[in-house]
Amino acid sequence: MGYTITEKILARAAGLPAVRAGQDIKAKPDFVLAYDFPGYTDVYFKTMKEDFGIERVAEPERFGIFIDHMVPTATAKEEELHINTRTWCAENNVPLFERHGIGHQVAAEVGYATPGAFVVHFDGHVSQLGTFGTLAIGLRRNVMEAFVSDTVSIRVPDTVRVNLRGSLRPGVMARDVFHHLVRRLGPSSCRFQVLELGGPSVAAMSTEGLQTITGLAMFTGALTAIVNPDPVRLDYALPRARKKLKPVSSDPDAQYSAVHDIDLSDLEPIVVVPPTPADTRDLTEFLGLEINAGYLGSCASGRLEDLRAAAKVLEGRRVKTGVSLHIVPTSQELMAAAAREGLVSTLVEAGAFVSSPSCDYCFGRIATMTAGQRAVSTGTLNVRGRMGSPDSEIYLCNAAVVAASAIEGRIADPRPYL
Amino acid sequence: MTMPVMRGRVAFIFDEMNFDVDQIVGVKNIKITDVAELAQVAMQAYDPDFAKSVRPGDLLVGADNFGYGHPHYPPMKAMRHLGVTGVIAESFSPGYWRGEVSMGFPQVSCPGILGFVRRWDEIEVDWAAGVVRNHTQGTEIPFEPLPQADAEMIEAGGLVPFLKRQAAQQREQKDHAHVPGI
């Protein structure tokens, strides 16, 4: 019986000839990533020193720290947190990526998405490195183990395999594919397991679309998501890779706990209704619902294909007066590319507020909603209070739906605009 | 080293699937850091008398995928302050599970628990036998064994004590390895 890509990566990381799902192991992450956030990185740095006597990390090249939240800062206290982070990185010789964009995207751009690598973070959206055949797991507080020791204690997860076939129709995007998975498989379908994407349509899917789908894996209950790396993904990832590793893939006779088939050509645009990422419905059920705000951005969406979709809808049109539309490209690299393509001017001329990359729109730190307000959003999450008041509402949808809704001031179908 | 005692009454049954634990204190209270204040606002939407009726040792029971969403730590900090010693659910959402286990707060995955208890039943988690016992009804039901690291973390009382113990063990192994003749 063959092995899954996950079992192969973890076997190497554990220094064992082979591991199987269900086995408790100690595995050495190739990379340990984090963004600075109060109660997280500041606590790790302090705990390392005070409780474990670690003044310097032994292998700084294994680490990567991002400053992407609280960018730009709004209070002196936030700036102090960033100073603490900069100081720690400088003292430890650990690479710091500040203002390059949202860390999970930047991590791919700067080579932490090394095919075959095992990566840990505290934040689960790091799962999107799985696009490149990297096993990237969000451990929450437990990532501290990777800061104070070489290894992390984990159980080798089972894998749910999802085969994609067919192709998406106009107006249907990667966001819809992911939310459709939650609907079809259920919000606990992949609990404590890895969601592995495969099938004939994966090779034809955009890298950006795969980053979207894998980055949201946690809402199926998955620990992470992964794709067996194909030539397109390897062409992107290998020249940037920070470590020489042999890419690995699941064996044809690998054992999965479940196998699902999804025909992409059946899919329709979806909205995810507040207050839970589990409530996934057809867009058509909610057309006409008034909105106050639109947000296109986040680590899940906000890449070129999202910006292109929005620009196509908004070109020569105007955002409705009274609606605030925030468009935040996921990284500086992507924003510069969007500017070169002329997307930024199209969006700005349509009345969008286009900002440099930051995580802050996604969790209501800025563009904060008040009670009774409603947003359409490509952010990661729609729980109560995520973008401001607990009595505001977030309808998650694809970038084209955000753009069309911003024009009409109500949830709208983008297809007539395309 | 022993696992914490879990014997008490079923203080509440969250029978909603994919339960978002932030609702326990309400999102508007999620930034409160004072645990006594959190305990006061806890469960207002479910049972305003909860703080008065709960006793040290009591347990919570949950449905499938307990802790789904974007769980924060304050709700269970409030519960621990009120004396709750653990959660038993049909199944858990991994993010919530990891977070609470790292706080040393026992979580027990027990398919069938919803039909096995009524509110205020006296129950007990028998770690050694791998069963939850209902003393009120005289029944028992098996629970799923914990992954090794999770069991060790709960036993140690949380992430930092677990990591310290692990570091000490590793130092010891190293020291032994360097003693000539052994």
Image (cartoon, coloured by chain):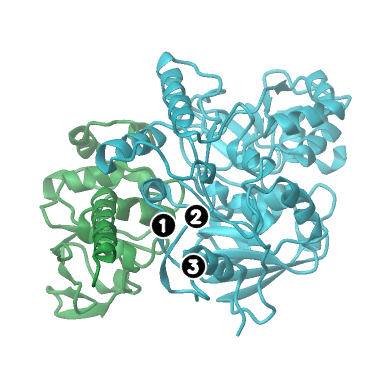
Residue B85, quarter of the rendered image? bottom left
Residue highlighted by disc 3: A15
Residue highlighted by disc 2: A29
Which residue lies at the image location 77% right of the left edge and 61% below the top edge?
Answer: A230
Q: Quadrant of the N terminus of chain B?
A: bottom left
* Residue B60 appears in view: no
The residues tagged by marks 2 and 3 sit, at their Cα atoms, a distance apart of 11 Å
How many tags in the picture? 3
User: N-terminal of the two: label 2 or label 3?
Assistant: 3
Element under label 1? strand
Which residue lies at the image location 67% right of the left edge and 22% below the top edge?
Answer: A355
Percent position (x, y) of residue A341?
A: 87, 30
Residue A248, quarter of the rendered image? bottom right
- Kindly indicate whether the residue at mark 3 contacts the one at mark 2 (C-beta within 8 angstroms): no
User: N-terminal of the two: label 1 or label 3?
Assistant: 3
The residues tagged by marks 2 and 1 sit, at their Cα atoms, a distance apart of 7 Å
Give me the disc on residue A152. Answer: 1
Q: Viewed as shown, does residue B77 lie left or right of B54? A: right
The amino acid type of the residue labelled 1 equals Val
Chain letter behind tag 2 = A
User: N-terminal of the two: label 2 or label 1?
Assistant: 2
Element under label 3? loop
The amino acid type of the residue labelled 3 equals Gly
- Kindly indicate whether the residue at mark 1 contacts the one at mark 2 (C-beta within 8 angstroms): yes
Dot 1 surroundings within 10 Å: few (below 14), some, or many (20 or more)? many
Chain assigned green: B
